Amino acid sequence: MMNETIDTIMSTKLITLTPDDTLGKAREILMTKRIHHLPVVEGKKLVGMITAWDMFKIGKSADEYQHTKVRDVMTTKLATLEPHQHIGAAAEVLMEHLFHAIPIVNDEGHLVGIITSYDILRYSYNKEYPENLEKFIPENM
């Protein structure tokens, strides 16, 4: 079921940060875009990731975020996958390490996408259920 490649379901329209951006900018993006993971890049090269959890666990105030650089908080040791790997490999990494997102990079280490636990859940749901469920939903719901 999960033998298709990651590039068929990964998100490619990414919002990224640079190491010199502030946590204030990260916080604003996380809150307004309702996302939980922000890849950090230098040019196109993935150099880290910052998450909503990273922001929470440092225990700084919103005011302090304006003076703290992303580089000081970002995770730099990342699990990555390549776009041609199977969705099942992504599911395994997510479950094994309790991650919720994996950056997808090409051979040069350039960020090309991200796959999240939600992407895999949506993929599995769409495989299991027909596209048009209206015929199964009672009119009074």
Image (spheres, rainbow, N blue to C red):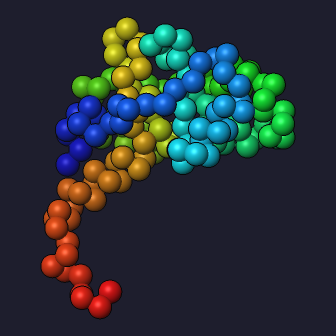
Number of dots carrying numbers: 0
Between 5 and 14, the one lying in front of the other is: 14
Location of residue 10 in the rendering, given as x and y in whole percent from the top left corner: 33, 36
Residue 61 seen in this snapshot: yes
Q: Quadrant of residue 23?
A: top right
Between 141 and 39, the one lying in front of the other is: 141
Q: Quadrant of residue 132?
A: bottom left
117 in relation to 54, above or below: below
Location of residue 40 in the rendering, given as x and y in whole percent from the top left corner: 56, 22
Q: Residue at x 32, y 54 (%)?
A: 122
Q: Residue at x 37, y 42 (%)?
A: 91
Q: Residue at x 20, y 56 (%)?
A: 127
Left or right side of 37 for 26: right
Between 128 and 43, the one lying in front of the other is: 43
Q: Residue at x 37, y 8 (%)?
A: 108
In which quadrant will I find the C terminus? bottom left
Location of residue 107 in the rendering, given as x and y in whole percent from the top left corner: 33, 11
Left or right side of 54 for 14: left
Residue furthest to the bottom in view is: 140
Residue 92 seen in this snapshot: no
Location of residue 87 in the rendering, given as x and y in whole percent from the top left corner: 29, 39
